[in-house]
Image (cartoon, helix red, strand yellow):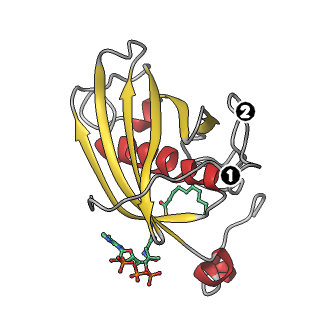
Amino acid sequence: MPTDIEPLARHPKATRPGEKIGLHHSMCYGCGDEAPVGLRITVVAGEGVTTTATMKVEDWMQGGPGVIHGGVLSAAFDEVMGTTPLLLRKPVVTGHLAIDYAKPIPLGSTVHFTCEILGGVGRKIYTRAYAHLGDPDVLVAGAHALFIEIDLEKHFAGYRDKAVHAGE
Ligand SMILES: CCCCCCCCCC(=O)SCCNC(=O)CCNC(=O)[C@H](O)C(C)(C)COP(=O)(O)OP(=O)(O)OC[C@H]1O[C@@H](n2cnc3c(N)ncnc32)[C@H](O)[C@@H]1OP(=O)(O)O
């Protein structure tokens, strides 16, 4: 992370603390409520530029016997951390994501995520997140990520004809 990052302030019209941040689209693998397979994560705005989220670890998320697949946990962090910049009213995509896997996470458990925006430079937004299973003092994983602010229309312009819509 660069040393010259600057603090980033919550947008005055951002989702209020305690409220759910809206889906970015209903068929998203991370947050969509109509996706045929997905994490269905709801991210809740916290104070400042922080968020929280939870995810029940379903049987289909299994990697090693009895525990979550590392890639699924990575996707969950990506979703939580990528949604958090919406508190700045900035759409982003992931540039870099790093996960520390501290403890196995059993199927059937509920993962609690906390995320904060550390700051930014230009279009770059740096975030950090942690995961626990109910006791915030016992972390099971942590993550850092760099998100890049995009122009939504331009970024997806060449892909929208491939989009899958609910009911198709
Ligand atoms: C929209 C709402 C979203 C809500 C929730 C979403 C959660 C899920 C988020 C995702 O999973 S997004 C899907 C995964 N990510 C992607 O598909 C992104 C693919 N990559 C790209 O499209 C481009 O590489 C990207 C837009 C990220 C950057 O390309 P650009 O041409 O726009 O910018 P550029 O390459 O000039 O990079 C801008 C700055 O970021 C820096 N940068 C970009 N990628 C980096 C990287 N990987 N590591 C470090 N720095 C990076 C780059 O060096 C530069 O720094 P400087 O401003 O200091 O010059």
Crowding around mark 1 (Cα neighbors within 10 Å: few <14, some 14 to 19, many 20+) is some
Q: Position of residue 37 (x, y in %)?
A: 57, 47
Which quarter of the figure has residue 161? bottom right
**Please, what secondary structure does the residue beneath circle 1 have?**
loop
Mark identifier at residue 72:
none
Q: Which residue is mark 1?
A: 11
The quadrant of the image that shows the C terminus is bottom right
Percent position (x, y) of residue 89? Answer: 67, 58
- When the figure is inspected, residue 157 is found, relative to residue 85, above or below; the finding is below
Q: Residue at x 74, y 64 (%)?
A: 165
* Ligand 1 position by quadrant: bottom left
- The response on whether ligand 1 sits within 8 Å of label 1 is no
Report the residue marked by disc 2.
Answer: 19
Foreground of the two, 132 or 35: 132
Label count reads: 2
First in sequence: mark 1 vs mark 2: 1
Give the CA distance from mark 1 to mark 2: 15 Å
At label 1, the amino acid type is His
Residue type, mark 2 in image: Glu
Q: Identify the secondary structure beneath mark 2.
A: loop
Which residue is depicted at the point 43% across and 53% down?
A: 119
Identify the residue at the far bottom of this view. Answer: 158
